[in-house]
Image (cartoon, grey):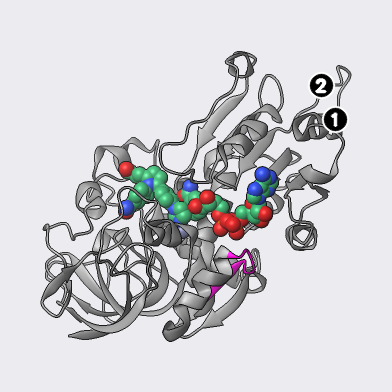
Amino acid sequence: MKSRAAVAFEAGKPLEIVEVDLDGPKAGEVLIEIKATGICHTDEFTLSGSDPEGLFPAILGHEGAGVVVDVGPGVTSMKKGDHVIPLYTPECRECPSCLSRKTNLCTAIRSTQGQGVMPDGTSRFSYRGKKIHHYMGCSTFSNYTVLPEIAVAKVNPAAPFDKICYVGCGVTTGIGAVINTAKVEIGATAAVFGLGGIGLNVIQGLKLAGADMIIGVDLNNGKKEWGERFGMTHFVNPSEIQGDVVAHIVNMTKRGADQIGGADYTFDCTGNVKVMRQALEASHRGWGQSIIIGVAGAGQEISTRPFQLVTGRIWKGTAFGGARGRTDVPKIVNWYMAGKIQIDPMITHTMPLEDINKGFQLMHEGKSIRSVVIF
Ligand code: NAD
Ligand code: 022
Ligand code: ZN
């Protein structure tokens, strides 16, 4: 069949809207009509050519929502008409990682996904007879895409596609980092570094988990109002305070007879390795946990003095918020439907596929929280 898609033909070039050829689903696969897709930083990272693992030509996009239009042989958990969200982190429930219950990083299709192909080693996409790579196993910048059944979450059919597509990455990553990775408890103190599309979801996750003090840190004063909208209680602009941001946060969070400061939980949502260090060191001596969510540039390294860890701070990272997609994504969609979390205000821009490059531009300039393409 044919599908309209935004194709990344070459690194550093704008996406081109063309009609691509798409083969139907093979065994264990489903064909999905994508109704809406968000634009996320990793798409830009790959398109720019900075991603050493980036493959071209490719159909990017990993934050989508749509409807099942066909299923391949052997597919049991889904049928035509089901509303779904593609998962860049699958959940096979059979591999050693899934069975461990200790990680969400399913390994069932890991190697082929990284090579931009389906689990059988081939691509379903082509253009003028030439293969086009899949991306993060999702390729949601195409009106139709094929995914393995284990990489698809079935969700509430009453939920609007143009909002819940964001659950496919940003919402789940931010809220999941709080609930699954940090396991924040009621009354906790937290600091969130970087109040973009991820940091704001960390803030609403902290609110949901019952944190008392939620400190937002951003260089952009415009983010103060944004943070407050989702539950932030204090705002720090590192460029506007006297001295060091770490000392400042430690001071703000001093409590107890010993007057030792530091947040119980800190989150890096910037991808800046210097900020990752600040976040660790702003966490509480003895038990503070710092969660790295931001993706740093290729080859970058983090550093701190080992004393920081010897004195009990814990450095962690999270992919997709530690969420098991087929299990957790439908729950998060229902939290949205029940009004427990917000999504609508964060979707600052929508556009047709033809204008997708404008969405990349808005993200690049820091003018959007999220842009969503509506097919
Ligand atoms: P964004 O660009 O919308 O937000 C980043 C924010 O950080 C901006 O508001 C910016 O002003 C602020 N900032 C930049 N430098 C700062 C500094 N030195 N101190 C304080 N604030 C600073 O980005 P986003 O969409 O929120 O994504 C954040 C990061 O999360 C990206 O690196 C993205 O790739 C990553 N991410 C990771 C996962 C995962 O599974 N681990 C999933 C999705 C996104
Ligand atoms: C999504 N991300 C950033 C912005 N939006 C993002 C990027 C990478 C990961 C998670 C989220 C990530 C962390 C750890 C891994 N990845 C490796 C997982 C593994 O090896 O098991 C990751 C993922 C998918 C892909 C590459 C890296 C891919 O499909 N190409 C989850
Ligand atoms: Zn993403």
Please say if 284 is above or below 322.
above
Q: Residue 338: percent from the left, percent from the top?
A: 62, 70
Res 127 → quadrant: bottom left
Of residue 97 and residue 298, the one placed in the foreground of this image is: 298
Quarter that holds the N terminus:
bottom left
Q: In the image, residue 69 lies at what x, y percent?
A: 26, 82
Write the residue at 63% across / 63% down: 366
Is residue 317 inside the magenta stretch? no
Label 2: few (<14), some or many (≥20) within 10 Å?
few
Callout 2: SS:
loop
Task: Give percent across and percent down for residue 164.
Answer: 51, 71
Q: What residue appears at the point 74 percent right and 59 percent down from the top-left corner? A: 223
Disc 1 designates what residue? 251
- Give coordinates of residue 138: x percent, y percent: 32, 65
Q: Does the image show residue 318? A: yes
Mark sitting on residue 260: 2
For marks 1 and 2, give the CA distance.
8 Å
